[in-house]
Amino acid sequence: MSSLRTEICVVGAGYAGLSTALHAAKRGYDVAIIEATRPGAGASGRNGGQVLPGFAADPAAMIAEFGETRARALWQISLRGLDKVRALAGNACDIRDHVAVVAATKADLPRLARQAALRRDVFGDDATAILDADAFKRALPGLAGHGALIDKRAFSIDPVKYVAALVGQAKSAGAALYERRPAIGISRENGKWHVATAKGDVIADRVVLAANVDLPGLEAGTERLLAPVRTFMLETAPLAKFPAWATGAAYDTSKALRYMRRTADGRLQFGAGGWPGRGNPPLAETWLRRALHKALPDLARAKIARAWSGLVDVTTDGMPRFADREGLIHLVGFCGHGVALTTLAGQIVADAIEGEDADFRRFAGLPQTPTWPTSFGQAAQLILGRAAPV
Ligand SMILES: Cc1cc2nc3c(=O)[nH]c(=O)nc-3n(C[C@H](O)[C@H](O)[C@H](O)COP(=O)(O)OP(=O)(O)OC[C@H]3O[C@@H](n4cnc5c(N)ncnc54)[C@H](O)[C@@H]3O)c2cc1C
């Protein structure tokens, strides 16, 4: 590729970049996506597949920080993300309805009930049900816990199939995808953005940085908005008999942030943990197995087929941040809660480029406190926000 001219250059082919490309191409823009390796190589091809309403910030914290009106508006916007994922995933991504939020301690159940009440009374979102300990055991056999909030709006998908669905739709809409083309620099010349790659520059009117925590030298200052946190997953071999769960996926309120999903071929995908920084800690797999034992004691000896980890982009308040500086657009801070939000972000960016920027400005205008996790516990807490009972 020598130098290439386009209207919009999207850096990164995860959900955020692919959705931006899809929605911008549908609006008639000329779009080129440049991806360092392959689509879904980042968090989008590695996640737990839980498509959740809201944000990593829990409802009470949102209300305390933004006030009821603004918090409700943000929550309502987030619900559109779920509809969008359902529509784009279609029948191709193994959708399973409902996600359980499991109370890891007895005290967490009344807190989850208060969270459900806040969602209903303040946010107008009544798609939850509370299960006491007995009902929980019947609905989610084999899972350790003291009850659960069933989120009837949430669902789970196969995250890798969803990447493929977005790639197909972005290409069909006319976006060009360049794989193995890492952006290595960005500059502004004569009113255009130049994104440098080893194979030539992409020259664009606008650049959308959708590279999660990886913004290597692209824009000084962006990294100050977020901290990388690593989280870990494993997948079992197909289980002879998968427990008869009432939901396709669950996560719990423990500090270890345990989350799990049933795959279409009867495997368990299980994840946990938040390790500050990009490093890969020693003994992560042993630790993950212990977490599995705690969450699903009967499956503690299940054969593990594979294990992996991925990075999430964490902000101090669990809210994403968007920014647009002369057409250099950033999408960051999805905090381990990004399947629905990154998808929606793509549409919000395409709308903003077209001049319909009210939603974009809501996220661009959020305040940011510059304090970062310095310990495992703090990091887990930050991405645990989605599970934190009020
Ligand atoms: C293990 C794990 C479990 C998770 N579980 C859930 C869950 O259950 N539910 C949920 O809602 N969220 C979950 N998340 C978070 C969710 O996956 C992310 O918020 C979302 O996928 C982020 O999408 P993205 O497009 O912003 O980033 P990514 O998917 O990380 O995409 C960024 C892309 O940019 C590319 N890139 C990087 N640098 C460059 C460069 N210089 N040039 C070109 N390309 C570049 C990368 O290769 C990558 O493909 C989880 C995350 C992880 C890691």
Image (cartoon, helix red, strand yellow):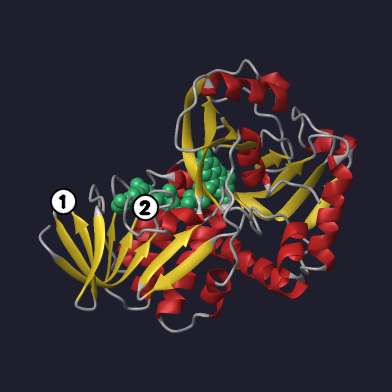
Specify the quadrant that holds the N terminus: bottom left
Residue identifier under label 2: 215
In the image, is 22 to the left or to the right of 79? left
In the image, is 182 to the left or to the right of 352? left
Residue 69: image quadrant is bottom right
Asked which secondary structure carries label 1, the reply is loop
The residue carrying pointer 1 sits among few (fewer than 14), some (14 to 19) or many (20 or more) residues within 10 Å by Cα, namely few
Asked which secondary structure carries label 2, the reply is loop
Sequence-first disc among 2 and 1: 1
Q: Residue at the location (70% across, 35% down)?
A: 255
In the image, which disc is placed on residue 57? none
Query: Depth check: 25 or 356 in front?
Result: 356
Q: Residue furthest bottom?
A: 355
Q: Residue 171: x and y, percent?
A: 30, 62
Residue 70: image quadrant is bottom right
The answer to whether the beta carbon of the residue marked 1 is less than 8 Å from any atom of ligand 1 is no
Q: Residue 34: x and y, percent?
A: 27, 56
Residue type pointed to by label 1: Ala
In the image, which disc is placed on residue 198? 1
